[in-house]
Amino acid sequence: MMEEYKMIIAGVVGSAVTLLITAVIDFCKQRYVSRLEMKKLVFQRRTDAAEKAMSWLQEDADCYRMMQMACDEINEKYNPVTVEKFTRSTNQANKLFGETAFRLNPFYLYDDFSEIEKRYNAFQVNQDMNDVITEIGRLGLQASELRDRGVAEEAEELKEIQDKIVDLYRELANILDVQISMIAEMQVKLRKQYSKYKI
């Protein structure tokens, strides 16, 4: 009887130990699968954010190049047609700026470009660009008001304003060059990060 009792206890203990080991293994497996799913989800979100950001950065760089071409065309002489090209590219830049929250901000959750931004002094360059564009607009408005009052295109007052505008376009072309270089470096860094996932 004692022998049967010992065998029953051994069987129960063995079954309990087997159940406990199985439960621990299942728990560890479930935890591993859960971590794997979380990593997969983060990678997918990071990739989605990177794709949107890369698209935004490319559009922004193209827009700045178009602005820069317009600035270079104005370089020698004030030209209303080129000013119109510049205005169109400025409108495109404003549209892109309006999309930053959706297309670019999530990107900064996963990637850090502060080193690049610091090297190019991004905040100051953006401020300089805004200041120059604002001044171009202010002077353009002044010129329009003079024309509306009947001042001739050849008048010294109008030519002086146009010369200032041309100088500002030259300054802006240099600022845009810095912006384009910064964007290109960000794109290179981003591509390098994802090149390890190529199949």
Image (tube, rainbow, N blue to C red):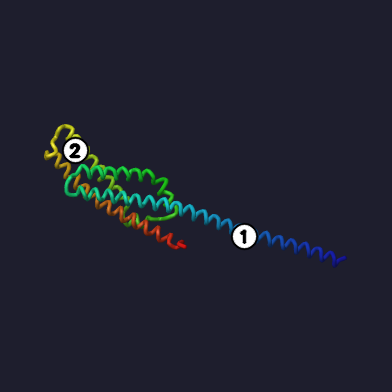
Q: In this rendering, is residue 146 above or below 32?
A: above
Q: Is residue 110 left or right of residue 88?
A: right
Q: In this rendering, is residue 186 above or below 163?
A: below
Residue furthest bottom in the image: 3
In percent of width and height, residue 62 lies at 32, 51
Residue at 62% x, 60% y is 29
Q: How many marks?
A: 2
Q: SS class of the residue under badge 1?
A: helix
Cα distance between the residues tagged 2 and 1: 73 Å
- Mark 2: few/some/many CA within 10 Å (<14, 14-19, 20+): many
Which amino acid does the dot numbered 2 rest on? Ala
Quarter holding the N terminus is bottom right
Mark identifier at residue 143: 2
Residue at 76% x, 63% y is 13
Q: Quadrant of residue 90?
A: top left
In percent of width and height, residue 68 lies at 26, 50
Residue at 78% x, 62% y is 12
- Provide the residue designation for mark 1: 29
